[in-house]
Amino acid sequence: MDGWIIIDKPVGIGSTQVVSAVKRVLRQGGYGKHKVGHGGTLDPLASGVLPIAVGEATKLSGRMLDADKAYDFTIGFGTETDTLDAEGKAIATSDVRPPRAAVEAVLPRFTGAIDQVPPAFSALKVDGARAYDLARAGEEVVLKSRAVTIHDLRLSAWDGAGATLSARVSKGTYIRSLARDIAYALDTVGHVTMLRRTKAGPFTLDQAISLDKLEESAKGHALEDILLPLTAGLDDIPALAVSPDQARALREGRKLIGIAKHQGLHLAVSGQVPVALVEVSGPEIRVVRGFNIRDVEG
């Protein structure tokens, strides 16, 4: 059980609860204990793609955190909340409801490289404490602006009181901050009323399953049918074929010399078995992250 289970997380539960659910169904299905982690937190009020790493795939969770993400989200105009979503309390109101044309006209200002201030209710640390803990305690939270990239941003639906947008964004982007700033640019206020992640790295909703489907597969001892291979999280990394002896050397942490034509990050594979993420620099090949996966003979 080394790979990915892509969950379509429902509204109302957190990412760590989904991780716990996967651990539970692995035990119930007789698969034993495995390391389980997620590839990017989704708030309880958000739904959508949550990659769950199992076994050796947990070594790639950091790469998934750094990957681009895509979201559909709705901005409800007229009320800003302290959390910038529907869970918080109102802190500002406005009678301004911008027309559709105005929303479409302002979106190019938020496309490309931009600076944004994260929400006070976020997991970022301020002097060693979580920002959301300080905010909940009533303390003023001042977070620094950060550079992020909005690769694509477009209006997908409109109902007069709110706008539903689709966005593809870089790591570190807060959709709640983006919604707040768009509302400000339209001379009004707003907050996120719906947030759904449609893509995380290479994983999309087409690959995602419900928690009910997860439990059904576990009861039928068929989790292998929904487990995507570890390599599914590395579709942007070229493969580097290595011999059994070279694979053994990499597993022992030794460097290889002169077997790669191209520089940069590669996935070393022995047959169909992932051996390690390796960095090719000049003639040297060194291990970045090794995988403890053996073939039938290994």
Image (cartoon, rainbow, N blue to C red):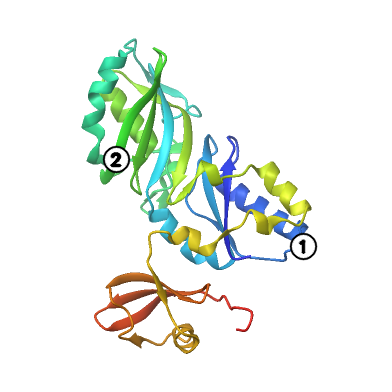
Coordinates of residue 103 in the picture (x, y in percent): 29, 20
Above or below residue 238? Residue 115 is above
Q: Earlier in the sequence, mark 2 or mark 1?
A: 1
Residue at 31% x, 41% y: name it: 142
For this orientation, the residue located farthest to the top is 95
Quadrant location of residue 10? top right
Task: Write the residue at 44% across / 61% down.
Answer: 234
Place of residue 125 in the rendered image (x, y in percent of width and height, measured from the top left) = 39, 51
The three-letter code of the residue at mark 1 reads Gly
| Res 292 quadrant in image | bottom right
In the displayed structure, would residue 260 be above or below residue 156? below
Q: Quadrant of the C terminus?
A: bottom right
Q: Which residue is mark 1?
A: 30
Which residue is rendered at x = 27% and y = 44% of the image?
A: 149
Position of 148 compared to 275: left or right?
left
User: Residue placed at 39% from the left, 12% from the top?
Assistant: 160
Q: Amino acid at mark 2?
A: Ile
Residue placed most toward the observer, 175 or 238 = 238
Residue 270 lies left or right of residue 22; in this view the side is: left
The residue nearer to you, when weighing 80 against 221, is 221
Compared to residue 165, the image places residue 291 above or below, namely below
In the image, which disc is placed on residue 217? none
- Residue behind mark 2: 150
